[in-house]
Structures are given as C-alpha cells and as structure tokens.
Image (cartoon, grey):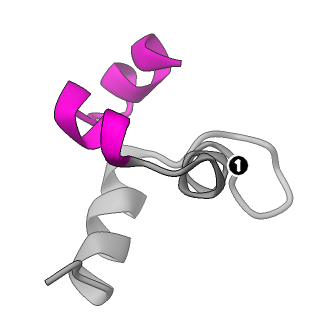
Amino acid sequence: MLRAAARAGVGPADFWRLSLKEWRLLTEAAGDGQPLGRREFDRMAEAWPDD
C-alpha cells in the first residue's frame, strides 16, 4: 500500500494519516477501479482543502 501511495504522489507522513476510507477513495476511481491519478488528486485537494 505504501508503494502505491508513493506512485500516486502521497508521501509517507500523509499516507499514515489516511483513514482506511480515505485510502479506498484515493485508490478507487468512480466506476473504473483505477487509482486516482496525481492530477485528479491535486484538483480534488484544491477544491476541498484540509485547512
């Protein structure tokens, strides 16, 4: 799982903060079963920041 996170651009500290639900959402795209790409993740993070 950590390797998959690294490939998706998620650093170790951020990886360990993810809940199982968040991990599943990051690795399951809607309907196609493909992991969320970095570009999509960046767009999502910009739209819904954690701050």
Please check the rendered image and state whether residue 11 is part of the magenta-colored stretch, yes or no.
yes
**Extreme-top residue of the structure:** 3
Q: Residue 33 placed where, x, y %?
A: 80, 43
Q: Amino acid at mark 1?
A: Glu
Tell me what residue is drawn at x 70 percent, y 40 percent: 34
| Magenta-colored span | 1-17
Q: Up-down: is 2 above or below 33?
A: above
Task: Tell me: 13 left or right of 23.
Answer: left
Task: Tell me: 38 left or right of 4.
Answer: left
Tell me what residue is drawn at x 34 percent, y 36 percent: 15
Q: Residue 50 placed where, x, y %?
A: 23, 78
Task: Tell me: 10 left or right of 13.
Answer: right
Name the foreground residue: 3 vs 21: 21
Q: Residue 18 placed where, x, y %?
A: 42, 48
In the figure, residue 42 lies in which quadrant? bottom left
Residue occupied by mark 1 = 28
Q: Up-down: is 44 above or below 23?
A: below
Name the foreground residue: 13 vs 43: 13
In the figure, residue 39 lies in which quadrant? bottom left
SS class of the residue under badge 1?
loop
Name the foreground residue: 36 vs 16: 16
Q: Up-down: is 46 above or below 41?
A: below
Q: Up-down: is 42 above or below 13?
A: below
Dominant secondary structure (helix, strand or loop) of the stretch shown in magenta: helix
Name the foreground residue: 25 vs 18: 18
Task: Tell me: 11 left or right of 5.
Answer: left
In the figure, residue 8 lies in which quadrant? top left
Tell me what residue is drawn at x 25 percent, y 42 percent: 14
Quarter of the figure with the C terminus:
bottom left
Question: Label 1 crowding class (10 Å Cα cut-off): few <14, some 14-19, many 20+?
Answer: some
Please check the rendered image and state whether residue 25 is part of the magenta-colored stretch, yes or no.
no
